[in-house]
């Protein structure tokens, strides 16, 4: 596990912005895959819009799958709040 994954696993708010950036701008699919995973682990509402955008724009199958899973993780976390 790398430092970025560790931050995501402890739901650190410090992990959110750098990973949103990686998800939306990095050219390497592996970096975008990892970013989606970390964002899903943080379960932060801040990640919802970037994940939805990535779901509709990223053509890499594994990145798309990770985006969907991350979005699902966040949705399940906040569904009790009446947001979804």
Image: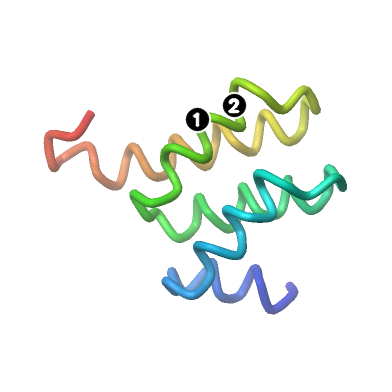
Establish if 59 lies above or below 49: above
Q: Using the image, tell me which numbered label, if any, was put on residue 83.
A: none
- Asked if labels 2 and 1 touch by Cβ distance under 8 angstroms, the answer is yes
Q: What is the x, y in percent for residue 7?
A: 56, 75
Drawn side of residue 83 relative to residue 30, left or right: left
Q: Residues within 10 Å of mark 2 (few under 14, many from 20)?
A: some
Residue at which label 1 appears: 52
Q: Quadrant of residue 42?
A: bottom left
Drawn side of residue 36 relative to residue 39, left or right: right
Secondary element under disc 2, as helix, strand or loop, is helix
Looking at the rendering, in which quadrant would you find the N terminus?
Answer: bottom right
Establish if 7 lies above or below 62: below
Identify the residue at image location x=64%, y=68%. 5
Residue at which label 2 appears: 55
Establish if 70 lies above or below 11: above
Q: What is the x, y in percent for residue 25?
A: 72, 47
Separation of residues labelled 1 and 2 (CA atoms): 5 Å
């Amino acid at each position: 596990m790398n430092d970025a994954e560790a931050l995501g696993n402890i739901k650190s708010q410090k992990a959110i912005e750098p990973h949103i950036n990686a998800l939306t701008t990095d050219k390497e699919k592996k970096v975008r895959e990892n970013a989606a995973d970390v964002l899903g682990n943080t379960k932060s509402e801040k990640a919802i819009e970037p994940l939805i955008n990535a779901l509709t724009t990223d053509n890499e199958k594994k990145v798309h799958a990770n985006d969907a899973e991350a979005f699902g993780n966040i949705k399940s976390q906040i569904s009790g709040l009446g947001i979804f």
